[in-house]
């Protein structure tokens, strides 16, 4: 059973069996002797060289699998075979570049929003925004990224949907509106995109919030 630990980069609590941070997306490196996350080349406790968390996980299908979205114009590199939805707990999340020079080979960078930080009026509490879509039945978790595309043949999560025959080649797009709220746009898919049971009209953005259910063809995703 996984426990909560702090990401060595952004210090946000994440699951101890993660391969990437759910919040900042950095690839995680772990000490093979102390079994703790670290940054840099060596463990600050025992001096052992750090290794990728994926390298210590073996080939067990019971652990979460992490993969960064594929930037536009870059081939999937066989991702469909390695991350078919039949795997137990598949994790797909946008990845930010690592600040350490030794981790320069980390996964590709997802689109980064340049929106300025918004200021709340005094006495008004901020409403938490969604950070992921979770399909428990298929074991898929999609980290949200502004402008990312969901599709079986094209987009940022091809490795998660390559074997899902009901999902269109280019199915839907996730984006933020001018108010900073998350929206999903159906890209004229064959089997449709739904928010809380309501089918979306093609190319019409619809907002969603934490607790909503988004259906991509035949896959139901809970918004978290």
Image (cartoon, rainbow, N blue to C red):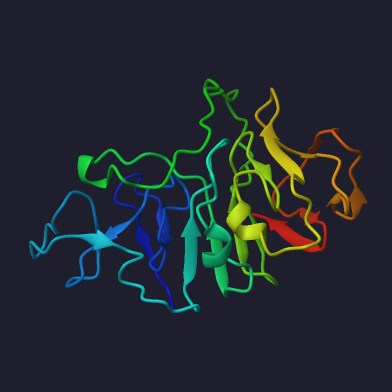
Give the percent coordinates (x, y) of residue 26: 38, 47
Q: From what the image shows, is residue 163 above or below residue 2?
A: above
Q: Nearer the viewer, residue 97 or 196?
A: 97
Q: Is residue 160 left or right of residue 110?
A: right
Check the picture and name the quadrant holding the N terminus: bottom left
Give the percent coordinates (x, y) of residue 128: 61, 43
Give the percent coordinates (x, y) of residue 183: 74, 37
Q: Is residue 204 left or right of residue 128?
A: right
Q: Residue at x 44, y 79 (%)?
A: 60
Q: Residue at x 34, y 53 (%)?
A: 7
Q: How many numbered tags mark residues here? A: 0
Q: From what the image shows, is residue 111 above or below residue 223?
A: above
Check the picture and name the quadrant holding the C terminus: bottom right
Q: Residue at x 70, y 72 (%)?
A: 137
Q: Is residue 104 left or right of residue 161?
A: left
Q: Nearer the viewer, residue 202 or 165?
A: 165
Q: Which quadrant holds residue 120?
A: top right
Q: Is residue 123 left or right of residue 58?
A: right
Q: Residue at x 36, y 76 (%)?
A: 58
Give the percent coordinates (x, y) of residue 145: 58, 40
Q: Nearer the viewer, residue 159 or 139?
A: 159
Q: From what the image shows, is residue 211 above or below residue 178?
A: below
């Amino acid at each position: 059973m996984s426990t909560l630990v702090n990401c060595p980069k952004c210090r946000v609590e994440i699951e101890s069996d993660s391969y990437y941070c759910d919040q900042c997306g950095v690839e995680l490196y772990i000490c093979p002797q102390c079994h703790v996350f670290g940054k840099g080349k060596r463990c600050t406790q025992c001096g052992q060289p750090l290794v990728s968390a994926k390298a210590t996980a073996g080939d067990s299908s019971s652990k979460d699998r992490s993969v960064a979205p594929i930037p536009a114009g870059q081939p999937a590199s066989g991702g469909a075979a390695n991350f078919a939805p039949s795997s137990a707990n598949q994790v797909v999340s946008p990845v930010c570049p690592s600040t350490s020079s030794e981790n320069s080979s980390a996964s590709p960078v997802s689109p980064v929003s340049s929106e300025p930080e918004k200021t709340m009026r005094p006495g008004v509490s901020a409403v938490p925004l969604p950070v992921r879509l979770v399909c428990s039945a298929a074991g898929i978790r999609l980290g949200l990224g502004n402008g990312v595309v969901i599709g079986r043949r094209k987009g940022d999560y091809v490795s998660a949907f390559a074997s899902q025959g009901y999902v269109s080649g280019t199915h839907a797009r996730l984006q933020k509106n001018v108010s900073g709220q998350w929206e999903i746009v159906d890209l004229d898919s064959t089997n449709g995109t739904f928010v809380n049971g309501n089918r979306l009209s093609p190319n019409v953005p619809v907002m969603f919030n934490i607790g909503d259910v988004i259906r991509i063809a035949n896959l139901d995703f809970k918004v978290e």
